Image: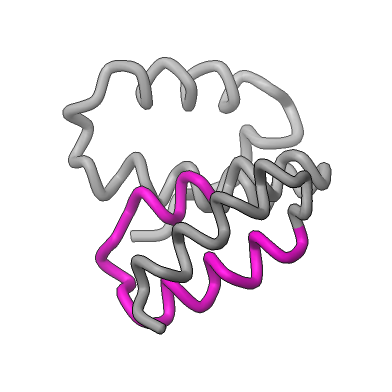
């Protein structure tokens, strides 16, 4: 399978609330195509459903930084998340 197929299957697993299975598929999709920043964002959503907020924030920040700060919605999301004390000291990967 290619990265797109893994991403689609991951999305289907999210619809079934199989978040662990979705994350596994997104991991494989990212392994095959690490430039697809949207997959990081969606994997972050699955991680947040499992209350892996640190993992979710890492994925969302990776997606955000890949957009080079051009997306206002992403900026707003991160501004809110960064105001939560447990996330304030987290540094985005460069």
User: In front: 57, or 47?
Assistant: 47
- Secondary structure mostly seen in magenta is helix
The part of the image, by quadrant, that contains residue 86 is top right
User: In front: 93, or 14?
Assistant: 14
Query: Residue 28, relative to residue 38: is it above or below?
Result: below
Pick the quarter of the image with the C terminus. Answer: bottom left
Query: Residue 36, relative to residue 52: is it above or below?
Result: below
Q: Is residue 8 magenta?
A: no
Q: Residue 49: where, in percent of width, then height?
A: 76, 40
- 70 relative to 47 in the view: left or right: left
Q: Residue at x 63, y 46 (%)?
A: 56
Q: Which residues are magenta?
A: 20-42
Q: Residue at x 43, y 72 (%)?
A: 29
- 58 relative to 3 in the view: left or right: right
- 1 relative to 68 in the view: left or right: right
Q: Residue at x 69, y 23 (%)?
A: 84
Q: Residue 7: where, in percent of width, then height?
A: 45, 61
The part of the image, by quadrant, that contains residue 70 is top left
């Amino acid at each position: 399978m290619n990265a797109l197929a893994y991403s689609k299957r991951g999305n289907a697993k999210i619809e079934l609330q199989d978040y662990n299975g979705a994350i596994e598929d997104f991991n494989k999709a990212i392994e095959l195509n690490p430039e697809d920043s949207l997959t990081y964002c969606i994997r972050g959503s699955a991680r947040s459903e499992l209350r892996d907020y640190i993992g979710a924030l890492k994925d969302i920040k990776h997606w955000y930084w890949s957009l080079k700060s051009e997306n206002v919605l992403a900026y707003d999301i991160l501004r809110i998340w960064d105001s939560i004390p447990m996330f304030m000291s987290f540094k985005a990967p460069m």
